Image: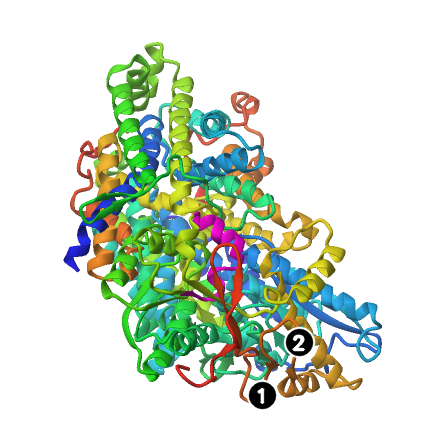
Amino acid sequence: MKRSSFLRVWTCLAAGLAVGVAIAATAPAANAADPGITDTEIKIGLFGPLSGPLVGYGLDPLNASKMMYEEVNKAGGINGRKIKLVIEDDKCTPNDLVAVVKKLVTVDNVFALHGGSCTAAVAAAQDYVNREKVPYLMLNAAGDNAVFPPTKYVFGSFHGTQRVYGGALANFAVDALKAKKAAIIVHDDDYGNANLKTTKAILESKGVQVVAVERIPPNINDLTAPMLRIRAANPDVILSGAYPAPTVLIAQKYGEYGMTKIPLLIATQGIPSPPAFAKNVGDNNALVNVYHTWSFTDIANEDVHKKYFSLYKSYFPDRTPTPFMVSGLPSALTMIQALKDAGRNLTRESLVAALEKINLKTDIMAGPLAFGPDRRDALRSVFVLKFDGKTEKVMPGTFSWDGKTGL
Amino acid sequence: MYGRLQTREIAALVAILAFGCLLPYAAPEYFVYLGNSLMMYAILALGLDLLLGWSGQFAFAHIAFFGVGIYGTAILQQRYGLPFLVSMPISAAAAGMLGWLIAWPSTRLRSVYLALATYAFAECAQWVFRTWDSVTKGSDGLRISPTAIFGYVINSDQRAFPVVAILLCLVVLSLQYLTKSKLGRHLCAIRDSEHVAAASGIDVRQVKITAFTLSAVYAGIAGGVYVLFQSFVNPDVLGASQLVLVLTMVVVGGSGSLIGVTLGVVVVGLLPEVLRLAPSTLLVWQEFVYGLILVLVVMFMPRGLWGVMNKWFAPKPAMALNASTKTDGDTVDAQEVGR
Amino acid sequence: MLFLLPQAIASGIVTGCVYALIALAIVIVFKSTDVVNFAGGELVMIGAYIGLLCIVYFGARYDVMVVVVLAAMILIGCLFQRITLEKITGRRFSASVDLVPLVVATIGFSYMLKGIVRIFPYTEEVRRLPPLVSGAPIFIGPVILQWQDVAILVATMLVMGLLTYFFQFSESGKALRATSQNPRAAALSGIPVARMRMLAWALASAISGLAGILLAPKLLMTPDMGGVVMLAFAAAIVGGFTSLPGAVVGGIVIGIVQNVIGVLMTPQAISVTPFFIIMVVLVLRPQGLFGDIIALKKV
């Protein structure tokens, strides 16, 4: 190579570099006060997985949120302002969700963010949201890693974290079933970690011996190995935090290996739709001793079910919602209440302050939705239901996590 | 060194730098973020193309080296307090070392066997990232704290952008030199025919291993870039779909050409963002359309978009034979890539 | 935990047979057209969903459903080979086959198949086909098997036997092998190469469809179930990638090893086992258990 070309390249590069550093050093950090809000309008960015493999967690819940906002607009808005939604698809992947959040904040200039159905994706946007100081409510992600430790601007877990499901099931196993030896089966991912930590801590604090902990990959095809190990450990209760497909396989093996004398307790995410679950298991004899958590009152209360599902039908006549639709309601209800509480003189900071003080009792949720100065997870108590394949029986009372054990 | 850098090649570098310095002030953070992502993917894809387009090795391990770059840089920075300018090169070198180790057994393998062995390695690496809780924080994901270079704190996309642009420039520059070097020539020769290359006195295995190692180093650098502008990493982003994305960029743009691959990165990388503008009822078609594009590209554009553009802009060849048929690529033009 | 092994191995054999069926489809395609079919899993998935469509939405009988699925799969396979792959391989008829475009084409095809299923609402939910045969479980000593498991075992052995016969003894089978070994020479000796390749894809797709019907009651259906193809690749690699009995043995080995590791070590390692096996086999014995010695086929 000739020397002249070499020199030319490096001179150009060095010049470019110098200019870059010079400009960067004098970067302005100006930020106008609270965009997305006018005298008549509040702009909210609403997003969830509307395509891709996890669309089932996002489509109906997002529609449910949308419908609650439209109901509010119909009733005249909040403190004289109507809500305007900007809707985006985050596919539930960290990359897409971060891109969506940045677009909503810097291009659409929304006032607040509301969305996200998957914990890992939400956690990826957390730093950005806090840096930009935008109030952010999750749509229906369990959100363990995004609310523990709590950060100022990220609120979520409106139908409970994994810690709540695990904690509720552990408390149920001890208080109602008088279990002495427990087996736990969870996935080897963030959901599983959170569930396992709390479940194990609560069980052990109450003197229950954890005889087997099986961590299975989410894409497992053959549940023989973990179920055999659990059977061999001879527990008197099994707690599962698995996803829908593995949960069906677990229930099948559980029936096949004649383990139905041992109660099987399943966290909400394993049974997003109880009738579909029973159909997939294919044998109701396997379901004589199955319990699951549920954060909503709609299964116990026919009127509540009718109220929200017929409302959905009136807004989206072409779509029959899945039972998991209701998981989009609490976040919208909380956002609406907080916007009301923050008053006419609304800023991002006053919304955050209002959210911190909120303690909302709704007809749809098992417990109150509450935040606090150091609390960003909304729901801490859920129902436990006994499901025999046909009917659901609500166990008396609600079961909760104290917010401390196994954090 | 065969031939020197041409003015337009230098112009490309200067353009990247100018773009890198000016865009952050002209655009909202969203676009700057997209720019950062695209530049990271460009480094990743150019590195993959070194194997795919230059030495004809169909290897899938790239994403694992990317992961080593990300976790290495982030962990060295956060846990051992090393500055970015130290931790990133160390991680890139570690990725290269790992690549070298993998290259030893796998360069004996050909075609599908190489592809599957390296794919299996990538899956194993992802499993390690997910399972090695004490180091990588496992599937909970690792939070990446802001990076600083000589006191220049990188805590936003705007601030990361010039640094990423400089890194991309260095990568492109090194590749430009590389393609003109003896090694570049050897790689082309091996891609076209291993036998002929071996007969001409090229140590085929050694050259393949070198290419594999270099490619891993580029993936490691891309991992360092990820650390610059992202604040969170989860092993899920190091899966097969990410790999297919990078592969798509290379194939759609035009394997074996720096400009082609860059074009592919821009087109494929922006596609999902452009699709956001489509009405929401069409969202469900995305995956199908993505697949269709891939199939159509390999059917009708064997040299990718860049090949098609070259055909349009190139002076019409005198031979009438080519004009009647859409197929091309029967002869591999070893020089095309270096032009 | 040793006393759990009989059941683990028995279940492993059955699950392994499912992998083996998919691996057979992959091996047939590779043997006869040099294409590594990354859409192999999605063909299984689409077969299962066509079956579901027949049974749930049209209320078809099981035997009718099987016929419809096989016919549809043959059509899909032939069309893909004829329209897409023929165009790519046709470009360079005699020169060495360029692996990258072919693999990318099958990856694109897999996205298209997945995308087609996703277009329909509610397909993201987990589904299940009714089993082919059902009844009280069978007890063999400490081992419990379902009738569907037996059906899977029988179907796999049957398919492998028929295929081996086809490739070894039938005219078309021999022609198919000739096509794969040297397409130009095959064409010169009067073998319709393009039609032979379509035949290979038709066979492979039909087997994938069958695998889908057998597997859907056992492993459940989602549009992402095609990921199981990696286990089939592992099976094929263990068996040598060109050997039909090898693919079956490989599948069973993978199934058993997964369960044994799951039982004796930790279920956490189940997902990484097949990939580990691929690496070990390729490094230590690239030709697998039954494969031909890998050599440069065509220069």
Circle 2 marks a residue in which chain? A
Residue A281 within the magenta-colored segment of the rendering: yes
| Residue at the disc numbered 2 | A362
Answer whether residue C187 is visible to the viewer in this image.
Answer: yes
- Check disc 1 and give the amino acid type: Gly
Determine whether B81 is above or below B320 in the image: below
Res. A258 image quadrant: bottom left
Dot placed on the residue nearer the N-terminal end, 2 or 1: 2
Q: In the displayed structure, does residue B292 sit left or right of residue A226?
A: right
Q: Main secondary structure of the magenta part?
A: helix
Circle 1 marks a residue in which chain? A
The magenta-colored residue range is: A265-282
Tell me the mark number nearer the camera, choosing from 2 and 1.
2
Q: CA distance from mark 2 to mark 1?
A: 18 Å
| Residue at the disc numbered 1 | A372
- Residue closest to the eye, A35 or C128: C128
Determine whether A17 is above or below B312 in the image: below
Looking at this rendering, what residue extends furthest in the bottom direction?
A373
Residue A166 within the magenta-colored segment of the rendering: no
Res. B305 image quadrant: top right
Res. A138 image quadrant: bottom right
Answer whether residue A10 is visible to the viewer in this image.
Answer: no
- Check disc 2 and give the amino acid type: Thr
Determine which of the numbered discs, if any, sits on residue C233 in the image.
Answer: none
| Residue shown at the point (36%, 76%) measured from the top left | A178
- Residue closest to the eye, C133 or A46: C133
